[in-house]
Image (cartoon, helix red, strand yellow):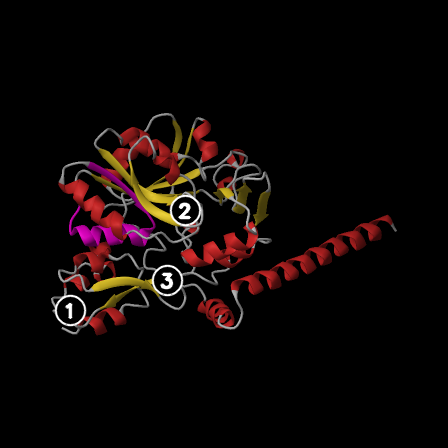
Amino acid sequence: MNIVISINDLKENCTGCGACSLACPCKCITLSPDTEDFMFPTIDENKCIGCGKCIEKCHIKHDFESNKCFTPVGFCAWRQDNIRLCSSSGGIFSSIIDSLCDKNTYVFGAAFSNDWKSVVHIRCNSNHYSRLRKSKYVISQITNSLYEAKSELQKGNKVIFSGTPCQIAALYAYLGCDYKNLITIDVLCHGVPSQKMYKKHLDFISKGREVVLVDFRPKGNGWNARFNVAFSNGDVYNKDQMHDWYLYNYFQNTFLRRSCYHCKYSTSNHIADITLGDFWYIEKYKKEYANEPGVGLVICNTQKGLDCFKHLEGIHVEEVDSDYYSYIYRSRENTYNRNKRDQFFAEKKHKNTELLEKFFKAKVFAIDILVKAKRIVKKAGRKD
């Protein structure tokens, strides 16, 4: 088997999980960034023995859907204490951890690094999981977490593993089976930009100031996405997605990983026990919930997930028909338009990120002036 050709054929769908490198008995696979700063496997052909174990552990080659025999059940839910204000939406992730955790439980999930300049996938216990709360619109590398989670499961310890849908798929593919002492939680994922893109943007807006907080979902004014950064000198950067270069391009799908543009987990094909997300447009379900400080959508995809969720305490919960939340799944039939992405990375070859940010800032400024001018003209016309 020509393993090098096989892995290269998978590159368009590769999510960079690193399960292949863990499975390789010769340790001849390493992960390194490509020209777009996303991690991909590279094989040392001189060491490869062609055993194919890397391909066996690749989640892209697995058909998880064929093993699914449970009809997902959806809920509208939120936590009934102040933890909800420290969470992206309803605070249900924290409730799950609180309900399941004991001294022999390990929680895996995405957290900001200590300097806030990257996002890491870490293992922690029930006393330190607060770092895993909140959305991080950045890719996290899960290779070490896959190895550590398998080790803890084999010891008989309980593991709660959270991540994007493709990261959960990578975990199951790497494990080769489900474990009774494993609960998996994924999210309604929009896609993932690279670590380097995030760091460059943070450096651009920091201008040498020390960062003490990054929050993509501050709740000072609703619970929509904002790029909120606090600095040690007391300064604050707080922009919505129409005024922040990173968020704007994130939601315009211009610099996501290639695999995100045809993700097979982007609709209802979630394989985690529980899927968590924001219950956007909650007013379509119940208008009186529109002013709540965050409402969570919880979808139990397995019986294990449903049993876990039904034992949670201290939450408001209502079962909802899938008609109320099916539109929250990507309405793109698994495909984003690649044109914007191709244009972005083509332009990035000739202009650095800082220059692109300055062009964006000037464009937004001009648009804001135009909008204000139109308002003034419209107001003056009313007076006449």
Give coordinates of residue 281: x percent, y percent.
Answer: 50, 44
Comparing 360 with 377, the one in front is 360
- Label 3 – label 2 distance at C-alpha: 36 Å
- Label 3 – label 1 distance at C-alpha: 23 Å
Question: On the picture, is 96 further left or further right than 63?
Answer: right
| Marking on residue 48 | 1
Task: Indicate the secondary structure of the residue bearing disc 3.
Answer: loop
Disc nearest the viewer among 2 and 1: 1
In this rendering, does residue 187 appear at all? no
> Magenta includes 17?
no
For disc 1, the neighbor class at 10 Å (few under 14, some 14 to 19, many from 20) is: some
Specify start and end residues of the magenta stretch as a single range: 158-178
- Mark 3 lies on residue: 38
Disc nearest the viewer among 3 and 2: 3
- What residue lies at 72% left-to-right and 56% top-to-bottom? 369
5 is higher (above) or lower (below) than 141: below
- Mark 2 lies on residue: 323
Marks 3 and 2: CB-CB under 8 Å? Answer: no
Mark toward the start of the polypeptide (3 vs 2): 3
Mark toward the start of the polypeptide (2 vs 1): 1
For disc 2, the neighbor class at 10 Å (few under 14, some 14 to 19, many from 20) is: few
| Marking on residue 145 | none
- Label 2 – label 1 distance at C-alpha: 50 Å
- What residue lies at 39% left-to-right and 38% top-to-bottom? 131
Question: On the picture, is 268 further left or further right than 281?
Answer: left
Give coordinates of residue 297: x percent, y percent.
Answer: 40, 41
Name the residue type under label 1.
Cys
Task: Indicate the secondary structure of the residue bearing disc 1.
Answer: loop
- What residue lies at 53% left-to-right and 37% top-to-bottom? 219
Mark toward the start of the polypeptide (3 vs 1): 3
